[in-house]
Image (cartoon, rainbow, N blue to C red):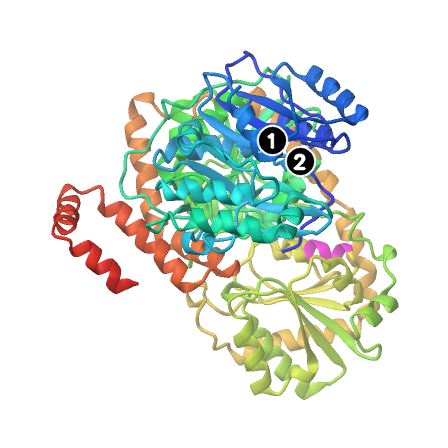
């Protein structure tokens, strides 16, 4: 995973203003000792939080440095939620216990944060929500970032057996106040003895368990001389204390770990009574709630990013909610331009609507945009019934007849009565929505996504040097296939084309750029066809601009597209395109910029890898024709983009659409508040329908981070037990087995 460690939270103070002052629910305890260098950034990252009901208790542990003491005085004046206490030096453990004695009576939670560590701005809010909706859990922690001295991403499956031997948690965790005092806090007078690890073990010994929130919410500064380093130097004494506590843990402790799917026809919760409602002050902007599936980088996701990153921040404020488990490799980039909540990382599906309702109220949302979120479409009728004055826009990238007989086009049309405007990326899709799905033509608009012509500018690149960088031959044509290697992109059709092309000429190399579920099979088939000498598998890259620069042509074999981003980018780089005639490809690729090849396979045959000789030969002929007239094609490509398909034009058009929609919402759109229960049942049915896909995506996430099969199966078993425990008959059987001593016997056998 690519992660930019330079993008640390708290570099600037950017706190949000709220309408009322609230009593603290969360007490943040921060030990401090002679650390003038880092504390301001740490405090900034706290004051920038999206949830304001907290207090910061800084415990100065006997600092002598005048600069540090002056810095504390400055910090205390920043915000009346910050309080500074001074005590004699006794170490971080005693400082935390001292701070806990001074928290407000209204506090329910204690968060530990060292004076050099940092928080993602949604940390408090997500931890608060996850503990309020997982009442049996006693503490919550996120995945973390190690930075400065050592750089790494830290994502570990919680394992109580492993925790007895190795600490996988960082100190930056939120703990229920009652649980903290039940175990008498840290209560260690010795310094540098793994006191945080010992504290987690004390909680586990009492049967307390955590929620593992699976996004990078905390930043742990790895200085050369840190508490961890000093504890390792004092390892013998530290391990003596830890091992003594570990022996008191008699039962295995199972955490709640996200992502997980545990929805089972439960009633959808519209609110959580115990959650404190707060509201931001009116910022005078159009506040957009954008619902998306994830933050990876396909064409649709690039559109989402281009949009939020380029909309005028003086006019628009954006909150993003994502709804599907994923390795969100580009979440960091999204967070630079919007407030991001991935619901799959911290919340059970039963409470998703409650959270969204809270966000709409808190952030004064006045426009909802849904793009490619299947669950988002299931939620829209409810949101419209609940918020009749908030207009809704959706963006449809393509129809997919092999996916729910229309995919997102069908989803959009099924809830058209609550959508003010549907945008599509090509005229062909607009025609399908109107002619096939019966949409009102005035409510469906073609909106081309555009490309960053400044980034994808061939004049910026030294092609010869890049060919050397990628070890490419200078005497051969370079053809590129840039996409996700999946059924939709028909990679095996490409192999047939390469095989046939090689029979006619051998002066070319094909770059395969991307990965996916068919990549390994594609490689083995290429060996079988004896064409590997004409291919280079480059894997996934974020340097596609460099790939275009070295390419003479790009090839698209897709059975389905909306209007491929790769086509925009390729033409912008002056590279002609050979593409299947699907979606809106011919609206961008004309006789001067490439060749459109008839698609001779039906969409429902997407999993059939047998292709007609005619279609294969059509591709070969198109490639040969372009290579024969390459200079002529290249000269026309970039002009096509500059004459109406730039990203600046896209943003200008979208700004006008958003402003007009908010100013003049369609008054005929809506659903009666009396139908709210029906809307909630629609969400329930949508959740049940996506269960299989959701569980598969969660499994893929776990596999990516190396969680073992045993751990994953244990996790599934715990979910099963949790569901079963809701039934009285199941609880009765378990209690009877416990009474008879059979459960203990089974545990011994298992061990």
Q: Are marks 2 and 1 in contact (CB under 8 Å)?
A: yes
Residue under pointer 1:
318
Would you say residue 570 sits in the magenta stretch?
Answer: yes
Residue 713 sits above or below residue 13 on the image = below
Near mark 2 (Cα within 10 A), the count class, few <14, some 14-19 or many ≥20, is some
Q: What kind of element bears circle 1?
A: strand
| Closer to the camera in the image, 506 or 331 | 331
Residue at 33%, 45% (x, y): give it: 262
Residue at 59%, 48% (x, y): give it: 301
- Which of the 4 image quadrants contains residue 281? top right
Q: CA distance from mark 2 to mark 1?
A: 8 Å
Residue under pointer 2:
337
Asked whether the viewer can see residue 334, the reply is: yes
Residue 535 sits above or below residue 747 on the image = below
Span highlighted in magenta in the image: 567-572
Q: Is residue 157 left or right of residue 750?
A: right
Would you say residue 712 sits in the magenta stretch?
Answer: no
Residue 196: percent from left, percent from top: 53, 41
What's the magenta bit mostly, secondary-structure-wise? Answer: helix
Give the quadrant of the C terminus.
bottom left
Asked whether the viewer can see residue 400, the reply is: no
Q: Is residue 521 left or right of residue 355?
A: right
- Which of the 4 image quadrants contains residue 47? top right
């Amino acid at each position: 995973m690519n992660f930019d460690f330079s993008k640390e939270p708290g570099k600037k103070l950017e706190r949000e203003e709220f309408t009322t002052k609230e009593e603290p629910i969360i007490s943040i305890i921060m030990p401090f000792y002679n650390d003038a260098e880092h504390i301001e950034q740490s405090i900034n990252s706290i004051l920038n939080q999206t949830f304001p009901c907290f207090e910061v208790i800084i415990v100065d542990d006997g600092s002598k440095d005048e600069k540090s003491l002056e810095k504390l005085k400055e910090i205390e004046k920043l915000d009346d939620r910050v309080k500074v206490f001074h005590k004699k030096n006794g170490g971080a453990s005693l400082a935390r216990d001292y701070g806990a004695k001074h928290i407000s009576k209204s506090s329910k939670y204690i968060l530990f944060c060292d004076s050099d560590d940092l928080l993602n701005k949604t940390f408090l809010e997500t931890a608060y929500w996850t503990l309020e909706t997982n009442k049996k859990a006693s503490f919550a922690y996120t995945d973390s970032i190690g930075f400065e001295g050592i750089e790494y991403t830290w994502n570990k499956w919680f394992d109580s057996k492993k925790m007895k031997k190795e600490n996988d948690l960082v100190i930056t965790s939120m703990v229920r106040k009652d649980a903290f005092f039940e175990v008498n806090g840290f209560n260690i007078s010795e310094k540098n003895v793994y006191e945080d690890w010992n504290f987690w073990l004390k909680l586990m010994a009492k049967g307390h368990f955590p929620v593992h929130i699976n996004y990078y919410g905390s930043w742990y500064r790895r200085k050369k001389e840190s508490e961890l380093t000093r504890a390792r130097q004092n390892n013998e004494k530290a391990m003596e204390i830890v091992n003594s506590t570990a022996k008191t843990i008699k039962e295995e402790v199972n955490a709640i770990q996200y992502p997980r799917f545990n929805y089972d026809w439960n009633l959808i919760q519209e609110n959580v009574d115990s959650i404190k409602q707060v509201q931001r002050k009116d910022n005078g902007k159009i506040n957009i709630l954008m619902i998306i599936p994830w933050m990876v980088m396909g064409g649709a996701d690039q559109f989402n990013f281009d949009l939020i990153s380029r909309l005028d921040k003086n006019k628009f404020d954006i909150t993003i909610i994502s709804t599907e488990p994923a390795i969100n490799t580009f979440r960091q980039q999204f967070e630079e331009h919007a407030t991001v909540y991935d619901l799959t990382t911290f919340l059970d599906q039963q409470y998703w609507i409650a959270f969204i309702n809270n966000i709409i109220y808190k952030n004064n949302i006045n426009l909802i945009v849904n793009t490619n979120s299947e669950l988002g479409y299931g939620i829209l009728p409810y949101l419209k019934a609940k918020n009749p004055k908030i207009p809704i826009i959706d963006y449809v990238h393509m129809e997919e007849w092999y996916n729910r007989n229309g995919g997102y086009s069908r989803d959009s049309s099924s809830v058209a009565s609550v959508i003010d405007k549907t945008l599509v990326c090509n005229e062909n899709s607009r025609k399908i929505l109107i002619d096939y799905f019966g949409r009102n033509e005035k409510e469906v608009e073609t909106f081309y996504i555009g490309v960053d012509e400044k980034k994808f500018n061939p004049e910026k690149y030294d092609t010869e040097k890049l060919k050397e960088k990628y070890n490419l031959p200078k005497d051969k044509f370079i053809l590129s296939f840039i996409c996700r290697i999946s059924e939709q992109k028909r990679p095996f059709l490409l192999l047939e084309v390469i095989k046939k092309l090689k029979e006619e000429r051998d002066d070319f190399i094909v770059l395969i750029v991307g990965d996916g579920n068919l990549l390994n099979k594609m490689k083995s088939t290429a060996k079988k066809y004896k064409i590997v000498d004409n291919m280079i598998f480059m894997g996934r890259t974020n340097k596609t601009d460099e790939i275009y620069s070295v390419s003479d042509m790009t090839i698209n074999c897709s059975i389905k597209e909306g209007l491929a981003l790769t086509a925009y980018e390729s033409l912008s780089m002056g590279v002609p395109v050979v593409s299947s005639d699907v979606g809106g490809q011919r609206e961008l690729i004309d006789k001067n910029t490439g060749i459109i090849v008839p698609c001779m396979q039906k969409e429902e045959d997407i999993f059939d890898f047998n292709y007609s000789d005619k279609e294969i030969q059509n591709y070969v002929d198109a490639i040969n024709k372009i290579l024969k007239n390459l200079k002529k094609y290249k000269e026309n490509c970039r002009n096509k983009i500059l004459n109406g398909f730039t990203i600046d034009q896209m943003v200008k058009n979208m700004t006008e659409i958003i402003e007009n929609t908010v100013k003049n919402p369609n008054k005929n759109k809506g659903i009666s508040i009396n139908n709210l229960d029906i809307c909630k049942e629609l969400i329930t049915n949508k959740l049940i329908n996506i269960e299989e896909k959701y569980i598969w995506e969660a499994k893929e996430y776990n596999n990516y981070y190396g969680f073992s099969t045993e751990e994953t199966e244990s996790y599934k078993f715990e979910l099963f037990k949790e569901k079963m425990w809701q039934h009285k008959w199941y609880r009765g059987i378990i209690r009877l087995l416990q009474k008879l001593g059979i459960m203990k016997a089974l545990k011994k056998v298992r061990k």
